[in-house]
Image (spheres, helix red, strand yellow):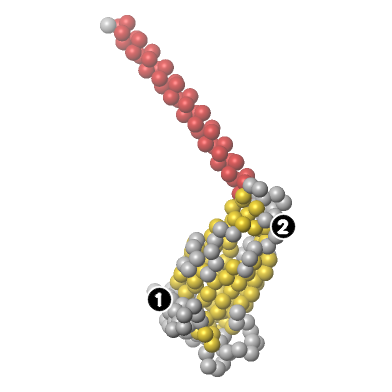
């Protein structure tokens, strides 16, 4: 009886040691994958090359407007001119890190529409970059934009009502070769009825990309 118990004990100990060895090997393997992934991400080098808005300060055209949800009674049109007046305007600037764009709508009012467009530059020497999604931030709030046509809504004054909506208009997945710029990317913006008159609305945008082996 004791002999059988000793054999069982030995088998149990051997099984434990074998499984421990497998666990150690698996942990080392997965850790190496994580480290490799971190190195790949750190090597990304892209920046905003340019940005602009449809309705900038001192334009001669009247302001633009649209219906909530970016609808309009004419097919394929989401916005149109107001009859008169240029009361609000927008501007955008590229931050010092070159990967964040700051957008401000000045003197905004309910119904006001604007559009921002921009390009990105691939500064990597040997790798293509694939644009995968955009990140929009307003204060402590963050939204992930990952498909064309997506609409996000913002509550700038935290009163529980949405003041603003943004619709992404460019498909993701573009491949940017080394040392070259992207096609124009853009999104629409619309101020909603709960927003008080004459507000300055501000938020930032950046894009994310992944490295593609040539």
Occupied quadrant, residue 54: bottom right
Question: Callout 2: few (<14), some (14-19), or many (20+) C-alpha neighbours within 10 Å?
Answer: some
Q: Which mark is residue 179?
A: 2
Left or right of 174, for residue 111: left
Left or right of 43, for residue 152: left
Quote the CA–CA distance across marks 1 and 2.
44 Å
Residue carrying label 1: 161
Q: Nearer the viewer, residue 119 or 142?
A: 119
Residue placed at 61% from the left, 77% from the top? 53
Q: Kindly state the secondary structure of the residue where label 2 is placed.
A: loop
Q: Which mark is residue 105?
A: none
Question: Going by the picture, which residue comes out furthest to the left?
Answer: 1
Q: Nearer the viewer, residue 148 or 34?
A: 148
> Where is residue 182 drawn, in percent x and y?
65, 63
> Where is residue 68 drawn, in percent x and y?
43, 79
Residue placed at 35% from the left, 10% from the top? 7
Image quadrant containing the N terminus: top left
Visible in this render: residue 25? yes
Which callout, 1 or 2, points to the residue nearer the camera? 2
């Amino acid at each position: 009886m004791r002999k059988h118990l000793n054999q069982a004990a030995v088998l149990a100990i051997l099984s434990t040691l074998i499984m421990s060895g497998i666990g150690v090997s698996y942990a080392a393997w997965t850790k190496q994958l994580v480290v490799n992934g971190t190195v790949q991400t750190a090597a990304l080098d892209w920046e905003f090359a340019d940005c602009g808005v449809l309705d900038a300060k001192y334009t001669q055209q009247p302001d633009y407007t649209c219906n909530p949800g970016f609808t309009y009674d004419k097919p394929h049109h989401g916005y149109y001119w107001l009859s008169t007046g240029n009361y609000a305007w927008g501007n955008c600037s590229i931050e010092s890190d070159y990967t964040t764009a700051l957008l401000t709508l000045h003197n905004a009012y309910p119904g006001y529409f604007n559009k921002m467009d921009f390009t990105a530059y691939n500064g990597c020497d040997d790798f293509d970059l694939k644009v995968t999604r955009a990140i929009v931030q307003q204060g402590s709030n963050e939204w992930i934009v990952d498909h064309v046509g997506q609409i996000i809504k913002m509550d700038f004054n935290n009163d529980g009502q949405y003041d603003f909506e943004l619709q992404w208009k460019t498909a993701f997945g573009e491949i940017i070769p080394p040392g070259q710029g992207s096609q124009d990317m853009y999104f629409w913006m619309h101020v909603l009825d709960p927003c008080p008159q004459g507000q300055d609305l501000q938020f930032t945008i950046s894009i994310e990309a992944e490295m593609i082996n040539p």
